[in-house]
Image (spheres, helix red, strand yellow):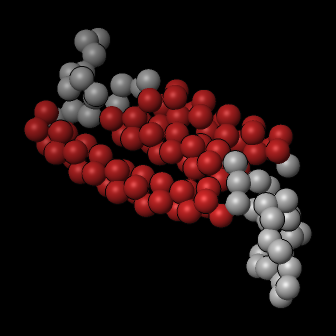
Amino acid sequence: MELILSLGIGVLTGSGVWLLLRPRTFQVIIGLCLLSYAVNLFIFSTGGLRTGAAAILQRGEAGTLANYADPLPQALTLTAIVISFATTALLLVVLLASRGLTGTDHVDGRERDR
């Protein structure tokens, strides 16, 4: 399971970095989204991957992290999802304003000479 998760995080990170280096602003925004997904998966995986374990404590049982997943990375991931949603919305508004002012969607504001 860890190998699949690591490969998924690596693919998301690589794709996000590749899209960040593209000249169009929409591709840059999608790259930032992919990078935020990769970071969220990484933070979520630091809490430990537990399958088949009970979600809550049983009566009279002492809770240890050996038996349960750590809830802090889950809370951090949820917060990061909300922040990345707001950031993506802001970047899309800036993209639309920039396209309206310059007439192009290139990052530097100029089309390449052909």
Residue placed most toward the observer, 18 or 86: 86
Q: Is residue 105 above or below residue 95?
A: above
Residue 12 lies in quadrant: top right
Q: How far from the left and from the top, in percent, is residue 100?
A: 14, 43
Q: Is residue 3 above or below residue 62?
A: above
Residue at 51 percent of width and 45 percent of height: 36
Residue 34 in view (yes/no): no
Q: Is residue 114 above or below residue 25?
A: above
Residue placed most toward the observer, 18 or 78: 78
Q: Quadrant of the C terminus?
A: top left
Q: How far from the left and from the top, in percent, is residue 66?
A: 85, 59
Residue 7 lies in quadrant: top right
Residue at 79 percent of width and 55 percent of height: 49
Tell which residue pokes out farthest to the left in this image: 101
Q: How far from the left and from the top, in percent, is residue 113?
A: 25, 12
Residue at 71 percent of width and 54 percent of height: 47
Horizontal side of residue 66 vs 15, given as left or right: right
Residue 42 in view (yes/no): yes
Tell which residue pokes out farthest to the right in this image: 52
Horizontal side of residue 6 vs 92, given as left or right: right
